[in-house]
Image: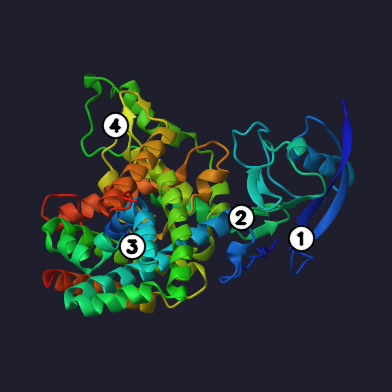
Amino acid sequence: MSRKPYVREISHTTWYLARRRDLLHMAQEVTSLFIGIYTIMLLWGVKALSEGPGAYQVFLDALGSPLVIAFNWITFVIMLYHSISWFSVTPKAMPVQIGEEFLPGGIIAAGHYIAWVVVSAVIYYLAGGFNG
Amino acid sequence: MTQRTVELSILRYRPEEDDKPWFQTYQVPCDEDWVVLDAINYVKDHLDGSLSYRWSCHMAVCGSCSMMINGDPALSCKTFIRDLPEGPVRIEPLANFPIERDLVVVMDDFMEKLQRVKPYLIRSTEKPLEEGQHLQSPAELKKFKQYTLCINCACCYSACPQYALIPEFIGPAALTLAHRYNQDSRDQGRDEREDVVASNEGIWDCSFAGACSDVCPKHVDPASAVQQMKIASTVDWFMRRLGLGGGKS
Amino acid sequence: MARSNKPMVWSLFAAGGTVAAFVMPVLMLLTIMAGYGQLTDSLGYEGMKSFASGWMGKLFLLVVIVTCLWHAAHRARTALHGLGLRADKAVAVIGYGIASLGSLLAVFYLLRI
């Protein structure tokens, strides 16, 4: 008897739309584009800083334009998603065995979330954010 | 016992007659404690003897009855009908594998990849018999025990977006099996396995979508195994560049 | 099979993902506040200049910029492949090229502050 296996083709451009799990994964991958754009913005700020007060003021003015502010708010939300999803899978990459038992992943993730809040608060404090 | 009639929508493919797969629906009177496999067995026994599918143990041990149930790969013997949403149940052969007939898929690629990672204990030095067995502490056993629970059902390959896009990818179960032996205190074969594991088609084709771990019916967590190997292989890579060992390049 | 050289970029990707997860949300918040003209003492020219003049500030900015650029370049490569772009070589060259150039520029600018 001859065989005739059937291969189901998948769309290379829309496969992730079929399942929520795949869509969320693709969303995580796409956060990288926003991280990249913001980092380039940061680099531009450093460049302006190195060029003196005039150049830096141009940079600050650009940050104040409605378009940039809108982009930054969107990016802020996307960054939160990146942080939450990144720390939630950290226990998978770095499981911790103490004696015989493995530490529950939730504890490792919780440790990262707490550290995240502390780091954020320290940076915010150093930037004078709590001064009123 | 309460009964309800459930509509099964099953993807059929008969290579002698069909050019492409098509859905056939069956009305099945299901008992409350039935799993999807019971309903499929009912079809085979009472409605349509021509339906082909694989199954054996009916208790989530043999790994042969995996299939797509409402779009997600699962063991049909472990999926209770009462846990599925109302309405028709869509049943298809495992995604990402060619269909041999009806719900039977071609698993040759999967089997070949399992072999490639050398999933057995490798010793560089054999201990003489008179020195006794290789002792292992409970902590050493615990390091890899979870990864021994894989039943080769291939649900993880079916859920893996990278395997869907890159057929050469060694894939979750085979890589996890490599990790199972790498983590075994009796094994000395990690460097040999790294030739496959640390190649581009090995761990580096994984994008850490984590779908493999989500669908694994035995909670093996392949995504974790692969990430751990990425870290270990990265340490190797830098050690080699620094001339501090880390295996051959 | 040959062992991959991906550990080189993957290590930067992983480091950048972790750095970004820890500091990007708060940096975004501060950037937005700067846009609204707040925190002029710390985020204005004098404040940022004194921050970036110290080696701690330089190191912080350098680590954030370099690791996050490489994180973005490497993950965008997978993302674009997932979205259906099959020109992987070109994406890699362009992405890693931008990351390399950006890393060098970061060093250059920071040393001039």
Q: Residue at x 20, y 51 (%)?
A: B247
Subunit bearing disc 3: C
| Whole-number angstrom distance, CA of label 1 to CA of label 2 | 31 Å
Q: Which residue is mark 4?
A: B186
Q: CA distance from mark 3 to mark 2?
A: 24 Å
* Element type where label 4 sits in the image: loop
Above-or-below relation of C46 to A87: below
Q: Amino acid at mark 1?
A: Arg
Confirm whether circles 4 and 3 share one chain.
no
Q: Rounded to the nearest whole Å, what is the CA distance between mark 4 and mark 1? A: 47 Å
Q: Which residue is mark 3?
A: C71
- The disc placed on residue B14 is 1
Q: Going 54% across and 52% down the picture, which residue do you hit?
A: B157
Q: Residue at x 37, y 79 (%)?
A: C90
Whether residue B147 sits left or right of residue B186 in the image: it is right
Judging from the image, mark 4 belongs to the subunit labelled B
User: What's the distance in space between the residues labelled 2 and 4, CA to CA?
Assistant: 41 Å
Give the x, y percent position of residue B234: 26, 53
Callout 1 and callout 3 share a chain: no
Quarter of the picture containing the N terminus of chain B is: top right
Q: Residues within 10 Å of mark 3 (few under 14, many from 20)?
A: many
Same chain assignment for discs 2 and 4: no
- Secondary element type, mark 1: loop
As shown in the figure, which amino acid type bears the numbered disc 4?
A: Arg
Q: Are marks 1 and 2 on the same chain?
A: no
Q: Which residue is mark 2?
A: A20
Asked if one can make out residue B119 in the rendered structure from this viewpoint, the answer is no
Please name which of the two marks, 4 or 1, marks the residue nearer to the observer: 4
Eye-nearest disc, 4 or 3:
3
Same chain for mark 3 and mark 2? The answer is no
Which one is in front in this view, the residue at disc 2 or the one at disc 4? 2
